[in-house]
């Protein structure tokens, strides 16, 4: 993983000078040359248009004695002027297109340089994360060597506390069991001291049936007392 990150960082580092050189070329040399070239066609176009304006002005004036040779020369100059103006305009358009392309390339180069900076920052962050992981791994490895002893030392107070609580709870449970047994013994003694033979009573038909049930087995149920043995 570390080698992979190092390879990526190396590739980005190698790309930086190339983009820097390209940026210098686009932003410096080409722009300066284009800036020096562009006024030429623009100035030439302006001069040609000015010359054509003069030639057109000459056409307005009609000499008293027509001179075919002069008229032909003026027409020829007009034609050459139009051709030169067309070529000059093409040169201007081409220069403008080159300027536009140059600006696009410069912007693209700037974007690439920015992206490289962002990626380098990301790689540096990942490299730092990897270093932190390696450090944590080393710490864990060192901790694992004495983990049993350290773990027992750390949890011993908790174990002692839980042990004490368990012992207290066991003592309370034993005391509660003893109290319950005593209570049950007392109930048994109380019932035994008041034991009655219900069979003769239940067989006595003169008793009110609403007071005692007809069957002796129901006497236990209704009065909640044990049947005699």
Image: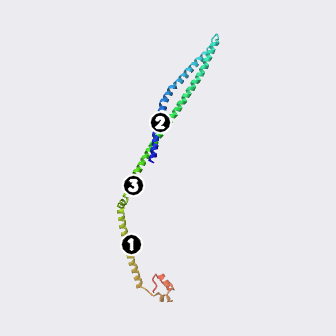
Q: Earlier in the sequence, mark 2 or mark 3?
A: 2
| Residue marked by disc 3 | 141
SS label for mark 3: helix
> Mark 1: which secondary structure?
helix
Q: Nearer the viewer, residue 154 or 196?
A: 154
Reading the image, the residue beneath label 1 is: 173
The nearer-to-camera label among 3 and 1 is: 3
> Disc 3 vs disc 1: Cβ atoms closer than 8 Å?
no
Mark 1 neighbour density, 10 Å: few (under 14) some (14–19) many (20 or more): few
Q: As rendered, which of 130 and 111 lies closer to the eye?
A: 130
Label located before the other in sequence (1 or 2): 2
Eyeballing the image, is 107 above or below 169? Answer: above
Q: Position of residue 196 (x, y in %)?
A: 44, 87
- Label 2, label 3: how far apart the Cα atoms are: 44 Å
The percent coordinates of residue 112 (x first, y second) are 49, 38
Residue 24 appears left or right of 155: right
Q: Secondary structure at mark 2?
A: helix
Check disc 2 and report the residue beneath it: 18
Neighbours of disc 3 within 10 Å: few (<14), some (14-19), many (20+): few
**Image quadrant assignment for residue 60:** top right
């Amino acid at each position: 993983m570390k080698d992979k990150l190092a390879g990526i960082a190396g590739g980005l580092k190698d790309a930086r000078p190339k983009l820097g050189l390209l940026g210098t070329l686009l932003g410096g040399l080409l722009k300066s040359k284009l800036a020096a070239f562009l006024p030429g066609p623009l100035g030439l176009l302006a001069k040609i248009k000015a010359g054509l304006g003069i030639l057109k002005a000459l056409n307005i004036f009609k000499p008293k004695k027509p001179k075919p040779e002069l008229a032909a020369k003026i027409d020829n100059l007009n034609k050459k002027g139009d051709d030169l103006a067309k070529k000059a305009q093409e040169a201007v358009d081409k220069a403008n297109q080159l300027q536009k392309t140059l600006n696009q390339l410069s912007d693209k180069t700037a974007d690439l340089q920015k992206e490289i900076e962002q990626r380098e920052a990301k790689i540096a962050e990942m490299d730092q994360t990897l270093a932190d992981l390696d450090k944590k791994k080393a710490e864990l490895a060192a901790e694992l060597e004495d983990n049993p002893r350290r773990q027992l030392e750390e949890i011993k107070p908790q174990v002692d506390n839980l042990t004490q609580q368990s012992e207290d709870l066991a003592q309370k449970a034993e005391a509660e069991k003893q109290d319950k047994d005593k209570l049950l013994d007392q109930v048994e003694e109380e019932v035994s001291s008041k034991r009655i033979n219900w069979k003769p009573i239940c067989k006595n038909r003169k008793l009110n049936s609403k007071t005692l049930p007809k069957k002796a087995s129901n006497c236990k149920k209704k009065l909640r007392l044990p049947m005699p043995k």
